[in-house]
Image (cartoon, grey):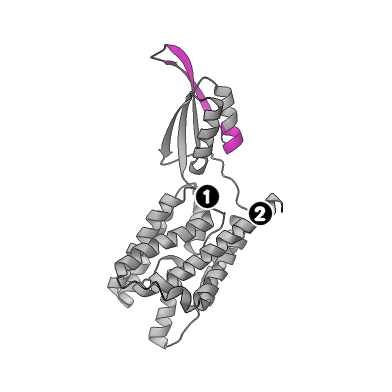
Amino acid sequence: MNSASMSSLKRFACVFISAFIMAFNINTLIHAGGLIPGGFTGLTLLIQESALKFANISLPFGVILVILNAVPAVISFRAIGKWFSIFSCLNIVLCGFFSDWMPPVFTSFLQLPDPLLNAVFGGILNAFAINLCLNVDATTGGTDFIAIYFSERQGKDVWNYILLGNCVILTLAGFLFSLEKAFYSIIFQFTTTTALTSLYRGYQQKTLLIITDKAEEVYTVIRDITHHDATSFTGIGRYLKTERTMLYSVVSANDVTPLISAIKAVDPHAFINTIRTEQLTGSFYRRPKN
């Protein structure tokens, strides 16, 4: 099996597992806590509850989820990438299927009586499932499509804006159903956002300040691994009174660890300072999604 086939198989496996975890989370912690998570998953559950409460109609979770994601999926297909959108849609369909048809044997043993525990651990499990998709260039759909779209265009994290929008929706839902459940749902969404920001660093950037005696070799490593450029400055090391070169480069956070290892292989004595980049203006290379 060639590397492309292995990559596709790994991608499919991560999407499949992510969908199963999300469906498991919905049928256990979310239902047990009476939570309404943010995003299109929460909106789907809200529509289900509204139809059941006000019209006594039981709607399938999967059908509603697919319908809500139809338009964002088309936009993603055109603006982000074909295979990114296809694997994302696969995750949505599988999540809907598992949510409606998951056997009780998978869900009966995890029914926590405390809504706060459901909110916190459900949020962590939700973040893990989302991160699993994002790391293989896919998404769980809904607001994730929106977040990825704007991150691609603006080059910055928008998860906190998604959290704010979800909180508004959940507060409105609280007045329709239960304000207490809405507040627990906000805790769920806050936990998801906080955990996801820690787990997924694809749209974070780091600034590297590298003092080295092998500037050309180190620059070649930066260019080959990250496809980013670097700017060199010449200065004087005050302790030894010798001329030194400092390279300045901004790279994706995911590239930092392998890049530092490669730099140390070229120059074991390189002095490297890594700084988190809060805001970046200008041209910045991003690997295209496919």
Residue 42: image location, x then y, percent: 42, 70
- Farthest residue in the top direction? 241
Residue at horizontal 53 percent and vertical 24 percent from the top? 267
- Structural crowding at the residue carrying mark 2, measured as other residues with C-alpha within 10 Å and reported as few (<14), some (14–19) or many (≥20): few
- State which region is magenta: 222-245
Where residue 52 sits, quadrant-wise, is bottom left
- Mark 1, secondary structure of its residue: helix
The number of callouts visible is 2
Q: Position of residue 285 (x, y in %)?
A: 56, 41
Residue, disc 2: 6
**What amino acid type is highlighted by mark number 1?**
Arg
**Residue annotated with mark 1:** 153
N-terminal-most mark, 2 or 1: 2
Q: Which-is-in-front pick, marks 2 and 1?
A: 2
Residue 228 is a magenta residue = yes
Q: Nearer the viewer, residue 290 or 284?
A: 290
Q: Residue at x 48, y 25 (%)?
A: 270
Whether residue 146 is in magenta: the answer is no
The disc labelled 2 sits on which kind of residue?
A: Met
Q: CA distance from mark 2 to mark 1?
A: 30 Å
> Could you tell me residue 65's position as x and y percent?
51, 72
User: Is residue 226 in view?
Assistant: yes
Residue 34 lies left or right of residue 19; in this view the side is left
Is mark 2 in CB contact (under 8 Å) with mark 1? no
Closest to the observer, 279 or 103: 103
Q: Tell whether 51 sits left or right of 20.
A: left
- Asked which secondary structure carries label 2, the reply is helix
